Image (cartoon, rainbow, N blue to C red):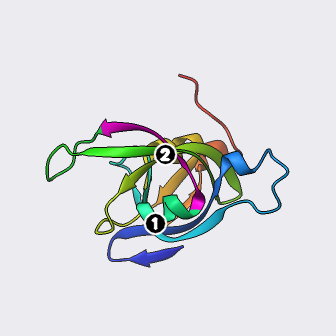
Amino acid sequence: MMKGMGRVLVDLKVSNFEDLPTKKKKVRSILVKDALIDTGAAMLALHKSDIQTLGLRFLRKVKVRTASGSPERRVFGVARVRIEGREGEFDVLEIPDSVPPLFGYIVMERLDLAVDPSRMKVIRNPEHGGDYALDLF
């Protein structure tokens, strides 16, 4: 994890979930460097080249709202994300190369992670004493 001008950046491992339950010799995985923690973004968002390397399947197109309008983006799945000793499965939104990889609030909540603004890093949720817990309400 790195600090950078008021932004929290993380490194995370992303794998093709479909490769995991099979007997494949090689699970397609990448290390995403400097993904931006973006609590305004909902999903995990990766570049087309990363999605191709992972071999994720196209699922659907969705309209997204951005500062520059409401373009249509492609969604792929399913990826396993590993960070801070936690892992979960998520769909991935394809983003242009001009945008950094994004780590959104749905991923943060499902993995029970939080941003520590004083240390500029992602931590296990202190409300749960660092233990993994999900709020169901």
Q: Quadrant of residue 89?
A: top right
**Residue 59: percent from left, percent from top:** 47, 38
Q: Which residue is painted at 67% across and 37% down in the image?
A: 133
**Magenta stretch prevailing secondary structure:** strand
Residue range of the region highlighted in magenta in the rendering: 54-62
Is residue 41 on the magenta stretch? no
* Depth order, front residue of 48/81: 48
Give amino acid for label 1. Ser
Residue 26 appears in the figure: yes
Q: Are marks 1 and 2 in contact (CB under 8 Å)?
A: no
Q: Which residue is painted at 58% across and 24% down in the image?
A: 136
Disc 2: which residue? 76
**Residue 68: percent from left, percent from top:** 14, 53
- All told, the count of numbered labels is 2
Precedes in sequence: disc 1 or disc 2: 1
> As displayed, is residue 60 above or below residue 21?
above
Give amino acid for label 2. Phe
In the visual, does 10 lie left or right of 96?
Answer: right
Disc 1: which residue? 49
Residue 130 appears in the figure: no
In the visual, does 80 lie left or right of 22?
Answer: left
**Residue 52: percent from left, percent from top:** 51, 60
